[in-house]
Image (cartoon, coloured by chain):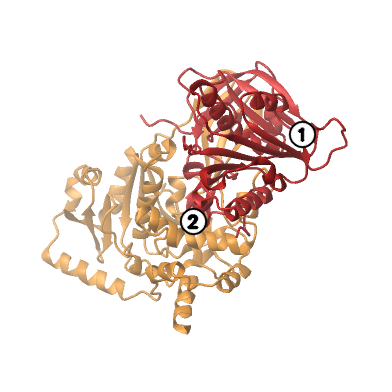
């Protein structure tokens, strides 16, 4: 009997936390055999409202539950964000290819706004590995937000610093005097991060203009194009390569992505929203 | 194996098939179009007319298909389990089903497609008189099928020559042994001549392989695609009528609070919102990107992924497009680009 790829698994929300305006972090109970890797996503259902792709933001083996971070945008994400502790939620997946990790090289994370969500599992995975196996890899997190109140996972940032990460925070505008981070675009602060461009992997996620600018800058500074990685957002209805919505440049982003390197983006001409990528 | 079926016996045979299967056959509707529909009166079968509109795709991938229904008790799957005969579909449509099989029954199986496909018998009718819009000849998908059918009928005047293409097809013949007789040598000669005559009846000669090469060698410039996009009405007719296009949308329909169903609907990449992301970016926002994407998908990406074009030469896009930017017209214009160099 063929497995029905469209049937969601119904499970329960264990806790909900509002991490910023219109952004909620859900902790969801999953069966023991549910495994996933950093960079993958799940299709999340609220029966009656619909189904949308959401990045996984927890790290398998580090956090017990599946964590999803959702911002209210359309009617399905609104429906998800109106759910509370104990409510039922449907999950299908995990889908997509995870981030490639090179154990010998440093890791640079460039995040913009809610773009930190798909990168957070890998940040925690690498820092966890550093703490447990004594890896010497340098982990740098550059994180830009609109204003201090929109910095997601602020409490975790200090934890990352304790675990040895080099964190650069920046905001567009700031009226708060207590803000200790930088201001300006995330790409303005490469100088503060002391990056060995030739021997690092970059993981980028954020608004399209930020992805575009960061990829261009890193490439310019000598980072190999197959080391510059991003995770692309796409309209998806199935997550399993059937509905055709995420098809781009001959690639299905749900199956062959969502993680792509700058090299692949150029080679296959995959450029959703990065139309003017040089 | 081949057999002869006298035309006088056709209604009898169809009636027989109808006792065990849902029988879908071409019928002339009130407007004069020939449509596939469940056959109730055997003599209404219209086998002489032009191509079927719309394509038989809707019997494997309905325009609206229920994925499951949900209620307080949980989720319940809905699989269609009725055995069905698609009678009188054209060889190009048989080829299109073969392509849908590659897509839906390949690496990741679609259980809904599989449920319908495994219970669907394809009885093809070879085309003796290709329409002016047809260009299957250059693609090898018609005017008669070589594989993919369960049975294929060729009209030889007062009788059909019946070819058996599968075991399922053979059992349909075995069920009515007295009306299927052995062909005479003259019947095979007639078949040969009928096929030759049909092949010479094509008005359009389209070479998609050449079009693919033109695209890949970058001889098709953006101004060409601009001129194509300019004539696009964004109606989606080409996609809906295409027997190979498979894209769908998924939505939930609530019946009452807590219960409802999840359905999928045909969707088309010609619509602007097709690729809209939550971040507000629409990757294929410009019309040129959408029309280009459709042609690229069929001419370049399908061959790369499945080894076959995403087109069978049925000409339905030509019939449905008000802007005349169908597969045949556009690829023929590309040929002009090569010559102009």
Residue displayed at 52% across by 57% down: A266
In-front residue for pair A37/B286? A37
Image chain in orange:
B
B176 lies above or below B333: above
A100 left or right, relative to A169: left
Tell me the SS state at disc 2: helix
- Please name which of the two marks, 2 or 1, marks the residue nearer to the observer: 1
Whether residue B195 is situated above or below residue B260 in the rendered picture: below
Residue toward you, B280 or A123: A123
* Residue B296 in view, yes or no: yes
Task: Give residue A232's quadrant in the image.
Answer: top right
Please name whichever residue, A230 or A54, is drawn nearer the observer in this view of the structure.
A230
Indicate left or right for B63 with B217 as reference. right
Tell me the crowding category of disc 2: few under 14, some 14 to 19, or many 20 or more residues within 10 angstroms, Cα based: few
Image spot of residue B144 (x, y percent): 29, 62
- Which residue is tagged 2? A268
Q: Position of residue B235 (x, y in %)?
A: 61, 59
A244 to B225, vertically: above or below: above
Residue B331 at x, y = what percent?
Answer: 46, 71
Q: Circle 1 sits on which residue?
A: A150
The answer to whether residue B53 is visible is no
Q: From what the image shows, is residue B195 above or below residue B2?
A: below
Tell me if mark 1 has few (under 14), some (14-19) or many (20+) residues whose alpha carbon lies within 10 angstroms of its own: some
Of A19 and B131, which appears nearest the observer? A19
Specify whether B288 is left or right of B39: right
Element carrying mark 1: helix
Which of the chains bears the disc numbered 1? A
Image coordinates for residue A253, horizontal then vertical, percent: 52, 45
First reached walking from the N terminus: tag 2 or tag 1: 1
Chain letter for the red part: A
The single residue placed furthest to the bottom in the displayed view is B340
Q: Do the residues indicated by labels 2 and 1 lie within the same chain of the protein?
A: yes
């Amino acid at each position: 009997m063929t497995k029905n790829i469209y049937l969601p698994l119904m499970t329960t929300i264990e806790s909900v936390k509002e991490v910023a305006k219109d952004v909620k972090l859900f902790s969801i109970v999953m069966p023991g055999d549910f495994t996933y890797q950093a960079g993958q996503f799940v299709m999340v259902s609220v029966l009656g409202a619909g189904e949308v792709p959401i990045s996984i933001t927890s790290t398998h083996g580090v956090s017990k539950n599946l964590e999803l971070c959702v911002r209210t945008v359309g009617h399905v994400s609104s429906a998800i964000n109106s759910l509370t502790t104990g409510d039922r939620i449907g999950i299908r997946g995990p889908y997509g290819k995870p981030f490639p990790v090179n154990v010998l090289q440093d890791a640079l994370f460039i995040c913009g706004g809610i773009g930190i969500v798909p990168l957070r599992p890998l940040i925690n995975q690498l820092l966890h590995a550093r703490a447990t196996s004594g890896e010497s890899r340098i982990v740098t997190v550059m994180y830009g937000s609109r204003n201090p109140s929109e910095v997601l996972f602020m409490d975790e940032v200090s934890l990352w610093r304790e675990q040895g990460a080099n964190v650069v925070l920046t905001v567009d505008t700031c009226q708060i005097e207590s803000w200790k981070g930088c201001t300006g675009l995330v790409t303005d602060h490469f100088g503060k991060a002391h990056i060995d461009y030739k021997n690092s992997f970059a993981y980028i996620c954020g608004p399209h203009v930020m992805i575009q600018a960061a990829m261009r800058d890193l490439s310019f500074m000598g980072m190999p194009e197959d080391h510059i990685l991003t995770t692309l957002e796409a309209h998806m209805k199935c997550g399993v390569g059937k509905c055709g919505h995420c098809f781009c440049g001959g690639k299905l982003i749900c199956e062959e992505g969502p993680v792509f390197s700058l090299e692949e983006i150029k080679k296959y001409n995959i450029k959703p929203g990065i139309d003017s990528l040089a | 194996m081949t057999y002869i079926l006298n035309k006088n016996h056709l209604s009898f045979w169809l009636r027989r098939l109808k006792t065990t299967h849902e029988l879908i056959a071409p019928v002339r509707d009130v407007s004069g179009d020939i449509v596939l529909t469940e056959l109730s009166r055997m003599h209404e079968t219209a086998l002489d007319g032009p191509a079927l509109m719309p394509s038989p795709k809707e019997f494997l991938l309905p325009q609206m298909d229920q994925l499951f229904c949900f209620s307080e008790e949980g989720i319940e799957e809905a699989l269609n389990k009725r055995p069905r005969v698609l009678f009188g579909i054209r060889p190009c449509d048989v080829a299109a089903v073969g392509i849908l099989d590659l897509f839906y029954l390949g690496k990741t199986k679609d259980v809904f497609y599989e449920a319908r496909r495994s219970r669907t018998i394809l009885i093809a009718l070879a085309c003796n008189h290709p329409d002016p819009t047809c260009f299957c000849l250059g693609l090898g998908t018609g005017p008669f099928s070589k594989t993919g059918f369960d049975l294929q009928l060729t009209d030889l005047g007062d009788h059909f020559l019946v070819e058996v293409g599968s075991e399922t097809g053979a059992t349909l013949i075995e069920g009515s042994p007295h009306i299927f007789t052995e062909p005479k040598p003259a019947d095979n000669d007639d078949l040969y001549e009928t096929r030759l005559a049909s092949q010479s009846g094509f008005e359009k000669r389209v070479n998609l392989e050449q079009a693919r090469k033109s695209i890949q060698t970058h001889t098709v410039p953006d101004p060409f695609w601009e001129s194509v996009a300019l004539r696009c009405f964004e109606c989606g007719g080409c996609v809906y009528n295409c027997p190979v296009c498979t894209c769908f949308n998924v939505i939930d329909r609530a019946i009452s609070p807590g219960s409802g169903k999840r359905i999928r609907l045909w969707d088309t990449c010609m619509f602007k919102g097709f690729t809209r992301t939550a971040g507000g970016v629409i990757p294929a926002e410009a019309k040129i990107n959408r029309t280009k994407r459709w042609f690229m998908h069929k001419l370049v990406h399908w061959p790369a992924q499945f080894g076959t074009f995403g087109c069978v030469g049925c000409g339905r896009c030509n019939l449905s497009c008000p802007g005349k930017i169908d597969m045949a017209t556009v690829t023929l214009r590309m040929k002009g680009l090569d010559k102009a160099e």
